Image: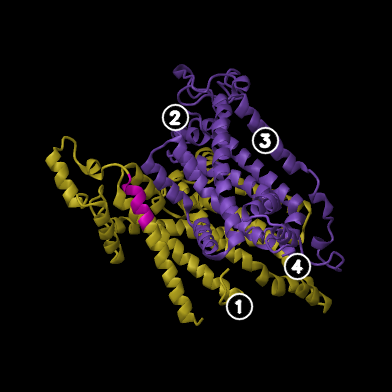
Chain colours: A purple, B yellow
Amino acid sequence: MSHVDVSAPAGPAAVPTTFAAETAPRSRRRRLTFKPAFGMVVGAALLLATLFPGQIAPSSPTDQRLAERLRPPAWMDGGTTGHLLGTDSLGRDVCSRVIYGARTTFLVALVSSLIGGIGGTGLGLLAGYHGGVLDELVRKLVDMQLAFPYLLLAISAMAVAGRSLPILIVVLALSSWPAFARIVRGEVMSLRERQFIEGARAIGCDDRRILLAHVLPGVSASLCVVWSFDLARIVVLESSLSFLGLGVQPPTPSWGMDLSESRQFLQIAYWTVLFPGLAISLVVLAANLVGDWVRDVLDPIVKRNRAAA
Amino acid sequence: MGWLGEAGRALGHLLVVMLGTASLVFVVLRLTGDPAMMVAPPGATLDDLAAIRRELGLDHSIGVQYVEFLRKLAVGDLADSFRYRRPALEIVSERAMATVQLALVAQLLAIAVAIPLGVIAAIRRDSWLDGTLTGLATLGQSIPHFWLGLMAIVVFAVHLGWLPTSGRGGWLHLVLPAITLSSYSMASLTRLMRSSVLEVLGSDYIRTARAKGLGAGLVLFKHALKNAMIPVVTLTGLQLGVLLSGAVIVETVFAWPGVGRLIIEAIHTRDYPLVQAGVVLMALLFVVVNQGVDLCYRWLDPRMAGRRG
C-alpha cells in the first residue's frame, strides 16, 4: 500500500500533454501549507491539554451536578456560559471532559505506538537484514495481521482479559507492529546491499552495530511517516473499543467512552456525543495531515533509498 | 504451477488461516470466567452447576476440550449457544446475510463513487476540484465510523426525519449504515485511484499512445484505466478486514442484526460458543473473499501469474 500511494508521475517533466495533470507546478507540495499547519496546531492543542488540563478546563471532569444535567451548549436556549459545551447525563461539564480526555487518548496512543513501533522496527530490521526463515515468518505474520479484521481479536481479548489500561495498551501495541515491520524490512533489504554497509562490514563492525548505527538512520525517514499514520489509527482503534464498552475504565475521562455513555441521550442531547467525537476526528485528521506532509517532504529520500538497491 | 496447484495452495492457505483463527479464539475465550455460572438459573446448587458443566463438556481438561472443538469444527458442528440453547453456527448463519448485505452494498458504493472521483481528481491535478476531493478523502479517512453514524442519525433521522434511525427493514434502513460503513473505504480508494491514475499517465506506454495521436479520452479509458485499476483491486482485498471491523461498529450503532452485533452481545453474556462461531464465520468470509480478490488480480495483471504479491 505504501508504494502505490506515492502520487508523483514517473515520466520526464517535459512531455507535451493535453492533461493539466502533468503541467502543474510540483514545488508547492514541499512548502508548509494550510493542511500540515492545521495538523500541527491541533497537535499543539492536544499537547497543551495533555500537560495542563487543570489550567485550561473550566471545571472538574468528574464533578457531578444532577440538577444541571443535559444542559445545552452556551449558545442555545437554556445554555449557560458556565458550561460552554453543555453538560452530560450526570451533569458533568462536557468541555472539561473533552479537555481531560485528551490526556488519556494521547498517552495511550503514544505509549502503544512506541511499544509496537520499537517491536515492529526491531523485527523488520532483523528480518530484512538476515533474510531466511525469520524473514519468511515475519512477512507471513505481517500479511495475515494487516488484512485480518483486528478489531475482532481486540474485542475478544478485551472482553476476556477485562478492561484495564495495561491490557488495552498491549492490545493496541500488538495492532501496530506490522506496519512498522513491513516498511523497515523493505528498506533494509535494499540498504543492506549498499556500499557503505559493505564498508562497515569490511572494517569489522558486527551486525548489531551495523543495524543500529548504519541501517537504522537510513530508515528513520520512513519511520516518521509510518508513526504519524499509526498514531491516527491507534486513536481510532482505542476510541472504537471504548465505544463498545471495552476500553479504559471509568472514571478516567475518555472520548470514546463518553460517546458510548451518552449514546442513549443522542436524540435529546446531541452535544454530549458531538464534541467528544469531534475531538477524536480532529486528532485523527491532524495526524493524517502531518503524515501526508512528512511523506511528501521526505519522498525523495525514500525513493533514493529504494532506487539505489 | 497449473491452476489445480493454485487452487490447492489457496485451499491450504484457507485451512491454515481458519485453524489459526479458531485456535486463537478458543484460547482467548477460555482464559477466564466459568461459562456454567452464566447459564445456571439463580439459586442453582453446586450439583446443578456440576451437571451443567458435564452437559457443556466443561468438566474435561482444556486440551480435551480443544481437540473436541477442532473435531467438531471439521464437520461444521460447533457447540450450542449457552444462551439460546441451539447450535451456535445456526444462529450465526441466520445473521450472516445481514452482514454480507451491509458490507457488499457499502463496498460497491465505495467503488462506484471512488473510481470516478479519483480519475477526476487525477486529470484535474492541483486544481481546486482536486484540492476539495483530496481534502474530503482525508476527512473521510479520519472520522471514525461510530461518530459518523451517530451524527448521521442526529441529522437525517432525528432532525430531518428522512430515514429510520436503526434496525433492518426496507432499503431505507440500509441507507445510513451503508454510507457510514463505506466512508473509510471510499476515501482511501479515491486517494489511491488518484495517485494510481497519475502514475500510469506518466508511464512510457501512455506517452507512446499519445505520440501516435490518440485522443485524450481514448488514452485514458482504453489504455490507462485498466492498469490504474490494479492497485485498486489489491486495496479492495486488503480493505476487507477494515470493512468487517467497521461492520461490527456500524451494526452496533444502527442496531443492524448482523454477525458483528451478535458477537458483541455474546461477549457481554459470555456466550463462548456463539462468539467462537461468529468469529470463525467472519474469518471464513474474510479468507474466501480474499482469495477471490487474489484470483481477480491475476486475471487483471497476467505479469503477476505464478508470483506472490
Q: Which of the 4 quarters of the picture holds residue A106?
A: top right
Say what amino acid the circle numbered 1 marks.
Pro
Q: Is residue A31 left or right of residue B265?
A: right
Identify the residue position indicated by label 1 in the image. B302
Q: Is residue B104 left or right of residue B66?
A: right
For label 3, the crowd category at 10 Å Cα-Cα, with few meaning under 14, some 14 to 19 and many 20 or more, is some
Question: Quick one: which residue is furthest to the left in this view?
Answer: B47
Residue at image position (79%, 50%) is A29
Q: Image height check: is B81 above or below A54?
A: below
Identify the residue position indicated by label 3 in the image. A42
Residue B2 location (% of width, % of height): 50, 82
Q: Which stretch appears magenta?
A: B23-31
Describe the element under mark 2 as helix, strand or loop. Answer: loop
Q: CA distance from mark 3 to mark 1?
A: 46 Å
Q: Quadrant of the C terminus of chain B?
A: bottom right
For label 2, the crowd category at 10 Å Cα-Cα, with few meaning under 14, some 14 to 19 and many 20 or more, is few
Say what amino acid the circle numbered 4 marks.
Leu
Q: CA distance from mark 2 to mark 4?
A: 53 Å
Say what amino acid the circle numbered 2 marks.
Pro
Residue at image position (76%, 55%) is A301
Residue at image position (60%, 29%) is A50
Identify the residue position indicated by label 4 in the image. B201
Foreground pick, A151 / B254: A151
Q: Is residue B141 left or right of residue B91?
A: right
Q: Main secondary structure of the magenta part?
A: helix
Identify the residue position indicated by label 2 in the image. A250
Chain designation of label 3 = A
Of the image marks 4 and 1, the number of the one nearer the N terminus? 4
